[in-house]
Amino acid sequence: MSFPEYSQYDAIGLTDLIKKKKISAREAVDEAIARAEKLNPKLNAIVFEAYDQAREAAKKPARGPLSGVPMVLKDMRAGAIGMPTRNGSRFSPMVLSDHDATNVARFKAAGLIPMGKTNVPEFGILPTTEGRLYGPAHNPWNLAHTPGGSSGGSAASVAAGIVPIAHSTDGGGSIRIPASNCGLVGLKVSRGRISQGPDFSDSTSGLSVDNVVTKSVRDTALALDLASVIDYGDPYFALPPQGSYLEGIKRKPKRMKIAVALKALDGKPFHPDVAAAMKKAVKLSEELGHTVEEALPALDSASTTMAFMTMWAANTALAVIGLSRATGKEPSLDLIEGLTMGLYKQGREIPAVQYLAMQQTLHRAARVTAKFHETYDLWLTLTLASPPLKLGIVNVDEQDVRKAFEPILGYVPFTAMQNATGQPAINLPLHWNKDNLPIGVQFVARSGDEMTLLKLAAEIEKAAPWAMNYSKIAV
């Protein structure tokens, strides 16, 4: 293999080359590092380099279904021996971990080789990756635009062809948003599907989950096979998988009834580029034999949003208070950003009774969506309300939370719903606009049913492959 071809391979394709001895794991890792050293000064996607550690790991005998494949880890929750996890915050000290998170240990057991940590906004708060600690990450399709957030560094690393797979987390769309902005597959899994042990149980009170971003459905399916193993120390588990996801996507899905959202929840029409992406997704679904009709679950979006933001503020306060206790320092604007300070101040004032009431509001929303899926197998929505935003739109120093979020109100209309209800949802990269910026669409399934999502995604990928678009990337 000539190394210019490296970025054309997904993780399964790359490990097949290694297993057939066409290249070595060390060669794959060296190429990933070389690409990182060339591209990261433009992207600012990788914020901690563990390159020597990766080279040492590549010397070990091949093992696992993704043996020798380099990857990167998000700077949130992915504790890894010899690497820090700072959550994008100056408040978090540069402490190297002495143990692997459960999910990272599973990555390594599968043969994946972590080579660094990726850029995130502070505490994963924003749908863009910009912050005081690391500075902005850039979208490889157009450097003036955001790769999305909060898994922006991970998505930029995969889209740019540095690695074929990257750890990500999703608390309000943080896998699907960057996947949409960077033209990737991004699966937000069901609540309880992937363990966050041993250091976390249900991060952000169950709103946030872990998984990966990839270029192919088969990589996403295999990664889920590797990660969805029950950890009996977890507070709850998703429904057991219906067999191997990688094997499941080889079988044609049943013909399904798909609901579609053809306008925003406030009744406003979609951005023309987003409308074009949705039209393409509907047309593809119908050509594949599925029934598509316009429908929305009967959710009270105002009360659900209020509950979500209340719980998010409280959990931000918990994170800040935890760091304060660990470091012995009081939170200040020298240590946390203005937006974080605003959420921290809000969160610490929320009474326990109010918090529990908000939690019950989200549980009721989950019952509403479960009822909706008695009629519809899947729900098709936009992922984002517009093409990727330009960098610099959000002021992270603004302490007034409402003012800070005002420039992006309406940008993320659907993704947080699935974090609230615990459902799985997947972004598929089905459209690029005239400016060569990717625009994804989202399919949502009933809780525990990642298999249906992945089978449909594989069917769509085969009918309208997106891999050739990566040759048009800017960097």
Image (cartoon, rainbow, N blue to C red):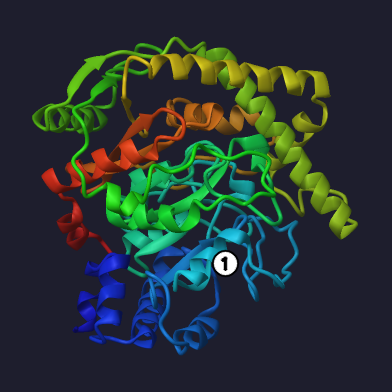
The spot of residue 280 in percent (x, y) is 16, 32
Q: Compared to 258, does 442 lie above or below?
A: below
Give the number of marks: 1
Which residue is drawn at the image coordinates 36% and 14% (left, top)?
A: 296
Q: Residue furthest right?
A: 328
Looking at the figure, which quarter contains the N terminus? bottom left
Looking at the figure, which quarter contains the C terminus? bottom left
Q: Compared to 338, does 220 lie above or below?
A: below
The spot of residue 192 in percent (x, y) is 57, 41
Q: Which amino acid type is shown beneath numbered disc 1?
A: Ala
Which residue is drawn at the image coordinates 26% and 22% (left, top)?
A: 258
Q: Is residue 430 left or right of residue 40?
A: left
* Residue 256 visible somewhere in the drawing: yes
Q: Compared to 196, does 58 lie above or below?
A: below
Please tell me which residue lies in front, 114 or 440. 114
Please tell me which residue lies in front, 122 or 401. 122
The spot of residue 111 in percent (x, y) is 44, 74
Residue 11: quarter of image: bottom left
Q: Residue furthest left?
A: 287
Which residue is drawn at the image coordinates 45% and 85% (left, top)?
A: 58
Which residue is drawn at the image coordinates 36% and 39% (left, top)?
A: 426
Q: Is residue 243 left or right of residue 109?
A: left
* Residue 351 visible somewhere in the drawing: no
| Residue matched to label 1 | 105
Q: Is residue 127 left or right of residue 400?
A: left
Residue 342: quarter of image: top right
Label 1 residue SS: helix
